[in-house]
């Protein structure tokens, strides 16, 4: 395999972006390493309290200017930002791939174009966020209008940095807000450059800012800042819980959480072509080495097709090629950190100790300094086992077998998570019945995974998978608050009537 780019030649913007300018100061720094080879690529400055205050203040000032701008002009500027991102596609794909688990060719073909598409999509909402008129007498008009919150704090994870950041930023600013983003300190560089391009595209300086550091200090300070009006977070369920506690302890503000998952891929015997199904099942657990919240981590399969399907999935897993994110032909991505890989190993080993069996893989390995985990299949999983209960966040597929449809749907349910699910059957009635029964925010039928065209529909989970919706119209409306306006058309010339205690009609002078 040849290298698609030289990682050592990638000049990472190790800085914050505040009010449209690079800011490199910080009393402390964090080492950002490349998971593909373990080499430290750059030192990242950590934002202190003063810098966070400056970022929030810059956002407040820019938001007033942005909100006053004509909606169609805001949409045109968002479209210009999208075009500038596409013009820098190769640069951004390298910045994304060099310190992440995302292969360069996928960043180039999927991640960066999807980020641009989110900006275009939500830019078209700028002049389409309409209010309503509610019922009233002829003597009054009742209006409901949508208004932006002000400053939005956005905290995003390391697994799909550019996609997950822009699908929050785009609807937030389309609704008239300004943003302070804290991207993951493990994968900060591509989004830093994307934010810098916003100012180059003509968006007001400070409308979108990015600050860096750990979640326990910088993240906590940002989400609890008194001038932050709303928080949007994607990441682990544990961290989401801490954010709720921190926000609740310091004030009252809305919080949207897109958290973890333990998504089933429910396969009935009448699923059709097993090779096609095996492609979906394999992709569902090995994309990004399983490091995504809606990974299809549980194969719940009808007994008569279980063995041939598992064999097909095993064959596909064995064909995956571990390699650096900058190598041509890499189909098994590295694991983001040693800590994350050790956690995978611990959960797999605990599951085996509890009675599960490894049918394929199950071990961590290194390749030219990079961190990897073998594509793994575990059978015999039951509720209570670590591999069933916990989100592994790696290329580990648990297998459960059922004998009838009702049992299959029951096994596919999870006691705590409910982000996504897939159902494979050629029986439309069976598919719809299962989709309605499954406790999940998104159910795919005869497929697995999101694509760019799905940005028209809402995404979000049930239970410990979080609350609030992203994408679609709910994604932008979630960044607005509603105000009721009641207009008396009689200019107060007549007395208003009110209903008093016991239903009596009283006159208000």
Image (tube, rainbow, N blue to C red):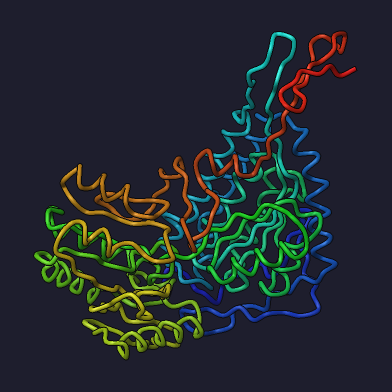
In the picture shown, does residue 38 fall above or below 407?
below
In the picture shown, does residue 164 fall above or below 214?
above
Position of 252 with respect to 127 (left or right) is right
- For the point 53% across and 73% down, the residue is 99
Kindly give the residue lying farthest to the front in the view shown.
502
The front one of 499 and 17 is 499
- For the point 27% across and 49% down, the residue is 445
| Rendered-image quadrant of the C terminus | top right
In the picture shown, does residue 161 fall above or below 381?
above
- Name the image quarter holding residue 176: top right
Where residue 233 sits in the image (x, y, percent)? 60, 60
In the picture shown, does residue 138 fall above or below 60?
above
Where residue 422 sits in the image (x, y, percent)? 30, 55
Number of callouts: 0
Q: Does residue 1 appear anywhere in the picture? A: no
Where residue 304 sits in the image (x, y, percent)? 9, 65
- For the point 35% across and 73% down, the residue is 332
- Name the image quarter holding residue 23: bottom right
The front one of 98 and 90 is 98
Where residue 317 sits in the image (x, y, percent)? 25, 73
Kindly give the residue lying farthest to the left in the view shown.
304
- For the point 41% across and 55% down, the residue is 109
| Rendered-image quadrant of the N terminus | bottom left
Kindly give the residue lying farthest to the bottom in the view shown.
353
Q: Does residue 96 appear anywhere in the picture? A: yes
């Amino acid at each position: 395999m040849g290298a698609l780019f030289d990682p050592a030649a990638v000049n990472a913007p190790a800085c914050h972006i505040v009010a449209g300018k690079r800011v490199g100061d910080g009393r402390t720094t964090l080492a950002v390493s490349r998971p593909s080879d373990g080499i430290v690529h750059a030192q990242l400055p950590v934002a202190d309290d003063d810098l966070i205050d400056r970022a929030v203040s810059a956002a407040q000032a820019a938001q007033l200017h942005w909100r006053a701008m004509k909606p169609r002009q805001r949409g045109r500027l968002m479209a210009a930002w999208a075009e500038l991102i596409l013009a820098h596609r190769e640069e951004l794909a390298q910045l994304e791939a060099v310190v992440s688990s995302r292969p360069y060719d996928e960043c180039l073909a999927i991640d960066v174009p999807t980020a641009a598409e989110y900006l275009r999509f939500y830019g078209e909402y700028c002049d389409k966020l309409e209010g309503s008129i509610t019922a009233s007498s002829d003597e009054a008009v009742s209006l409901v209008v949508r208004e932006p919150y002000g400053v939005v704090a956005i905290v995003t994870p390391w697994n799909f940095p550019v996609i997950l950041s822009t699908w929050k930023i785009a609807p937030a600013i389309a609704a008239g807000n300004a943003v302070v983003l804290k991207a993951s300190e493990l994968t900060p560089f591509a989004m830093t450059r994307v934010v810098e391009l916003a100012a180059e595209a003509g968006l007001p300086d400070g409308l979108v800012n990015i600050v860096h550091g750990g979640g326990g200090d910088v993240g906590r300070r940002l989400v609890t800042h008194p001038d932050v009006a709303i928080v949007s977070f994607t990441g682990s369920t544990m961290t989401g819980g801490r954010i709720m506690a921190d926000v609740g302890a310091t004030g009252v503000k809305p919080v949207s959480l897109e958290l973890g998952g333990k998504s089933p891929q429910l396969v009935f015997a009448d699923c059709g072509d097993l090779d096609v199904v095996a492609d979906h099942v394999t992709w569902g657990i090995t994309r990004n080495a399983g490091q995504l919240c809606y990974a299809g981590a549980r194969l719940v399969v009808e007994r008569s097709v279980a063995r041939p399907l598992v064999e097909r999935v095993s064959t596909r897993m064995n064909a995956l090629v571990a390699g650096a994110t900058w190598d041509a032909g890499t189909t098994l991505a590295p694991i983001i950190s040693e800590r994350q890989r050790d956690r995978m190993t611990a959960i797999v080993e605990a599951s085996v100790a509890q009675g599960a069996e490894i049918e394929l893989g199950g071990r961590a390995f290194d390749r030219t300094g990079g961190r990897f985990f073998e594509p793994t299949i575990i059978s015999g999983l039951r509720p209570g086992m670590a591999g069933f209960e916990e989100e592994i966040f790696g290329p580990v597929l648990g297998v459960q077998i059922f004998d009838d449809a009702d049992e299959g749907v029951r096994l596919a349910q999870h006691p705590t998570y409910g982000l996504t699910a897939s159902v494979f059957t050629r029986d439309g009635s069976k598919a719809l019945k299962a989709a309605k029964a499954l406790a999940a925010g998104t159910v795919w039928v005869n497929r697995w995974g999101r694509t760019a065209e799905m940005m028209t529909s809402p995404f979000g989970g049930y239970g410990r998978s979080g609350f609030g919706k992203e994408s679609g119209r709910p994604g932008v409306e979630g960044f607005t608050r509603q105000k009721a306006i009641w207009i008396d058309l009689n200019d107060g010339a007549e007395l208003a009537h009110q209903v008093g205690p016991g239903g009596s009609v009283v006159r208000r002078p």
